[in-house]
């Protein structure tokens, strides 16, 4: 297990390294650059630089700080019936795969490096289960039915209407135009069942989590009416460096360099990730624009979440 | 990549989605391995109605396994016959394609599988 240096509850939280960068900067706001949403034609190239390239580069460090499932997501997974087939689009290091051992889940991610981590991780889970004589560590199910593959969230290879559920956690806020964010939700909805009579399983549900603009209680200082398109730094630290930092060794203040390792005063490479921070109601609007229905929605710990489905939902239906 | 996963995959090319030839994808030059995974009977019984059985028969034959029966076993048969359950578990959950390609029967695009991981990223002219 990784060292529990991050706040385990924060979902797409900044890493411990980010915290350090923020605290040593003169102002948290100057560390985070604003980013105009990319033009539609350039969006793919923009995300290659400010999302895909970053995750490829920080994969080991990122993976080591992302190991604890978020309780609300875990609860959604545990609510699925045995034998259900689920997708985790943008699964990262696969921390949600194997949470419910009685479902079969396929995780996909745009980053081959993160998927390699996810595969190693799920293989280890599988081995642990077999070594323990078939009893899961939590005493629950026995088999670990998971698999992973590399795919783009806007170009998914999944058979349409075949999955019972899908999750997409801390992913869509990395897409740099509203059209692309809505298209990503449309792709998720196409993967899950419509709930026709006579088919196994009911209407498929899609759980989406995105970072919120309204983070009044967090140290990040983002709030209603603020800039929604940001570049958020990830400071890539070696493990020894992280420990040193935690013991109070101060890093230099000032803005983060644009290029990894560009400034000699900042020996730690800094990578700028693009984020679109969702304002209240925006995620629901995007679900409707994608042709979906909102089953439930809410706010939890700096994130907006929605459960979406294909068919219109009647009041009181869950 | 598990054989079970292949049953839920099609070609990623958008214009292939509407073609029945894009499912299932066809393994090519596949190198197989088998994992040791504990049987979960409840998972298998409940998975069965979610599987496209005809596609699984195609995949199984293409990978060189014995022909599967025309109809899937019923839940009762799975519960009563441990061999049927074990064989299905072995094929769906334990069998892995470690190296090789997956080929779309509609557009002919080949997706590489390396070290057990299939890559569905498309070259820009196919997106």
Image (cartoon, coloured by chain):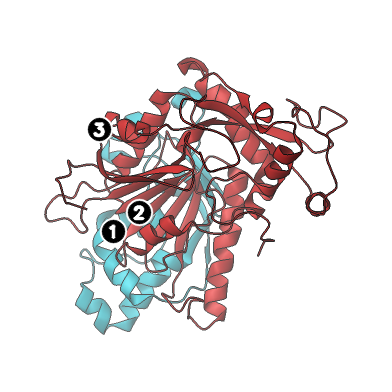
Chain colours: A red, B cyan
* Quadrant housing the C terminus of chain B: top left
Q: At which x and y percent is residue A270?
A: 73, 34
User: In the picture shown, does residue A169 fall above or below B89?
Assistant: above
Secondary element type, mark 3: loop
**Residue at image mark 3:** A291
Front residue (pair B52, A113): A113
| Residue at the spot of label 1 | B51
Q: Which residue is drawn at 27% across and 67% down?
A: B46
> Are discs 2 and 1 both within one chain?
yes
Image mark for residue B7:
2
* Spatial separation of the CA atoms under disc 3 and disc 1: 27 Å
- Nearer the camera: disc 3 or disc 1: 3
Are dots 3 and 2 on a single chain?
Answer: no
- Secondary structure of the residue carrying tag 2 is loop
* Tag 2 and tag 1, C-beta contact below 8 Å: yes
The chain that hosts pointer 1 is B
- Residue at 75% across, 34% down: A25
């Amino acid at each position: 297990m990784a060292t529990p240096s991050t706040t385990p509850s924060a979902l797409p939280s900044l890493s411990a390294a980010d915290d350090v960068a923020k605290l040593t900067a003169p102002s948290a706001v100057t560390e985070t650059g604003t980013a105009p949403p990319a033009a539609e034609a350039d969006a793919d190239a923009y995300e290659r630089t400010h999302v895909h390239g970053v995750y490829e580069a920080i994969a080991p460090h990122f993976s080591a700080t992302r190991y604890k499932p978020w309780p609300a997501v875990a609860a959604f997974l545990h609510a699925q019936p045995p034998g259900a087939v689920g997708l985790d689009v943008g699964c990262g290091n696969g921390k949600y795969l194997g949470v419910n051992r009685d479902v079969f889940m396929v995780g996909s991610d745009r980053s081959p490096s993160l998927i390699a981590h996810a595969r190693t991780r799920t293989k280890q889970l599988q081995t642990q289960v077999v070594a323990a004589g078939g009893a899961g560590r939590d005493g629950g199910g026995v088999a670990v039915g998971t698999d992973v593959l590399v795919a783009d969230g806007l170009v998914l290879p999944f058979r349409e209407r075949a999955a019972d559920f899908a999750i997409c956690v801390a992913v869509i806020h990395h897409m740099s135009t509203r059209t692309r964010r809505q298209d990503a939700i449309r792709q998720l909805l196409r993967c899950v069942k419509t709930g026709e009579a006579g088919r196994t399983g009911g209407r498929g549900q899609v759980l989406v989590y995105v970072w919120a603009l309204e983070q009044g209680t967090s140290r990040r200082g983002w709030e209603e009416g603020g800039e929604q398109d940001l570049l958020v730094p990830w400071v890539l630290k070696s493990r020894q460096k992280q420990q040193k930092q935690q013991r109070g060794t101060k890093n230099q203040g000032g803005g983060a360099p644009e290029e990894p390792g560009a400034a000699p005063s900042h020996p730690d490479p800094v990578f700028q990730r693009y984020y679109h921070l969702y304002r209240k109601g925006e995620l629901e609007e995007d679900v409707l624009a994608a042709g979906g229905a909102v089953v439930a929605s809410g706010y939890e710990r700096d994130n907006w979440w929605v459960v979406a489905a294909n068919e219109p939902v009647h009041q009181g239906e869950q | 990549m598990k054989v079970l996963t292949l049953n839920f995959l099609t070609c990623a090319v958008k214009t292939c989605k509407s073609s029945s030839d894009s499912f299932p994808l066809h393994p090519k030059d596949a190198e197989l391995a088998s994992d040791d995974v504990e049987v979960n009977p409840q998972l298998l019984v409940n998975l069965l109605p979610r599987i496209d059985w005809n596609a699984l028969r195609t995949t199984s034959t293409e990978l060189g396994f014995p022909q599967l029966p025309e109809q899937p076993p019923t839940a009762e048969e799975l519960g009563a016959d441990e061999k049927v359950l074990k064989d299905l578990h072995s094929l769906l959950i334990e069998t892995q394609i470690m190296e090789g390609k997956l080929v779309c029967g509609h557009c002919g695009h080949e997706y590489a599988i390396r070290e057990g991981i299939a890559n569905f990223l498309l070259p820009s002219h196919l997106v």
